[in-house]
Image (spheres, rainbow, N blue to C red):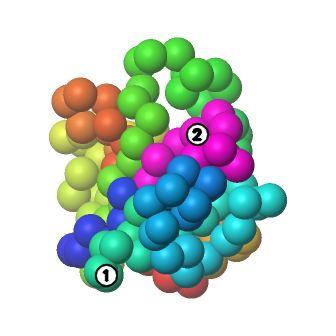
Amino acid sequence: MKITNIRLLTNDFENMFNFYHDILKATCVFGNKQGNYADFDFAGVYLSLFDKQLMVEALKLDDQLGNEHYNTQMIIIEADNLEKLYNQLKNDVNVLDEPTEQQEWGIKCFHVTDPDNNIIEFYEGL
């Protein structure tokens, strides 16, 4: 497995984009301020911004992410074998969803939480 990026979930995407792009001068390698997702390259480690409400909808969490139960950052980990990893973890951790194809994202993924309720996304490309 390999951590590929840290994703910040935001209620104000454009403001966050402007902060990282215009103030910190980070290089945006995907997305723009009119969008809902962007990747910034920090020497090979990516910081991603994603509209929080879209993540809520994608995980079918209703408004659980809107309350303080879940933090607003995610750790994104590329898996060598997603199904195998899911089967290894599903009985030992808090699993939020089963491996699901996200065609618009170009990945298949599932999500778990760590003991502090940080969300971890495990994925593999389609």
Quarter where residue 86 is shown: bottom left
Q: Spot the residue most to the right.
A: 34
Residue 116 on image: x %, y %: 23, 28
Which badge, 1 or 2, comes first in the chain's sequence? 2
Give the x, y percent position of residue 110: 45, 55
Badges 1 and 2: C-beta atoms under 8 Å apart? no
Camera-side residue: 43 or 71? 43
Residue kind at label 1, given as amino acid type: Gly
Residue under pointer 2: 10
Q: Quadrant of the C terminus?
A: bottom right
Q: Residue 42, percent across and down?
A: 34, 73
| In magenta stretch: residue 12 | yes
Residue named by callout 1: 44
Residue 92: name its quadrant: top left
Q: Residue at x 32, y 37 (%)?
A: 118
- Going 61% across and 76% down the picture, which residue do you hit? 30
Is 123 a magenta residue? no
3 and 35: which is toward the camera: 35
Residue 119 position within the rendered picture, expressed as x and y whole percent measured from the top left: 37, 42
> For the residues marked 1 and 2, what is the alpha-carbon distance in whole angstroms?
22 Å
Question: From which residue to which does the magenta span run?
Answer: 7-16
For image coordinates 22% across by 74% down, the residue present is 1
Mark 1, secondary structure of its residue: loop
What amino acid is at disc 2? Thr
- For image coordinates 50% across by 82% down, the residue present is 125
Q: Is residue 25 left or right of residue 82?
A: right
